[in-house]
Image: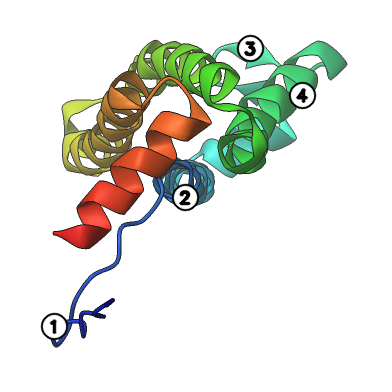
Amino acid sequence: MTTSRTPKPLSHPQVPVQAKLAAAWTSFMFLYIYVDYYHLHKPNVIDNIQAGVVFEFPITPALMTGFLTLTAIPSVMVVLSAVLPARANRITNLVAGAVYVPVTVFNAVGETWEWAPFYVVSIGIELALLAYILRSAWMMPRTIAAMADAASTTSRQ
C-alpha cells in the first residue's frame, strides 16, 4: 500500500543548486550593470567619457573589449550554471566567483569618501552575492546522482 503525503500549506519544494546559482548570477549581473549605469550620473563622468577617458584609462578597443568581457562573464554564468555537468559546474562557479571578488572591490579604487555610501551598498551586495555563489558551488554535490539524492531526501522531510 502506498500513501501519498499532502504538502503542507506554503510548503517550499527543494530548488536545485543549479537554479540557485543561475539566479544568483542573474542578480549579480543586473546589479553589476546598474551600478555602472548609475555611475554615469556622477559629475564629470560623461564629460570624461566624451573626452575619451574612463577612470584613468584612454578609451581603446582593448579597453572596451575588456569591459565587454567583464559584463559577458556573469551573463554566460547564468546559462553555464544551469546546463553544465556537476563537476564542471562547481569548478566554473568557483573560478568565476573568485575572479569577481577582486574585480568588484576594484570598483571602489580612486573614489572619494563622498561616494562611499554608494559603493559600500553596491559592492557590499555584489560581494554578498559572490559569497553565496562561492558557498553554493563549494557545497554543491559532486555528481548529478548525489544532487538527485539530496533533492529527494529534502523533499521527503
Amino acid type, residue under disc 2 in the picture: Ala
Vertical order, 70 against 17 (above or below): above
- Which residue shows up at 20% across the image and 79% down it? 5
Q: Earlier in the sequence, mark 4 or mark 2?
A: 2
Quadrant for the C terminus in the image: bottom left
**Of labels 1 and 4, the one closer to you:** 1
Which of the labelled discs sits on residue 8, or is there none? 1
Q: Nearer the viewer, residue 64 or 59?
A: 64
- State which quadrant residue 79 falls in: top right
The answer to whether residue 90 is seen in the rendering is yes
Residue bearing mark 4 = 64
Report, in whole angstroms, how far the alpha carbon at label 2 lies from the one at label 1. 23 Å
Q: Viewer-nearest of labels 4 and 2?
A: 2
Q: Position of residue 59 (x, y in %)?
A: 75, 20
Query: Taking 9 as reference, is 22 above or below it?
Result: above
In the rendering, at what x and y percent does residue 120 appear? Answer: 19, 35
Residue 9 position in % (x across, y down) = 14, 88
Disc nearer the start of the sequence (1/4): 1
Residue that badge 3 annotates: 57
Mark toward the viewer: 3 or 4: 4
How dense is the environment of label 3, judged by Cα within 10 Å: few (below 14), some, or many (20 and up)?
few
Residue underneath mark 2:
19
Distance Cα–Cα, label 3 vs label 2: 37 Å
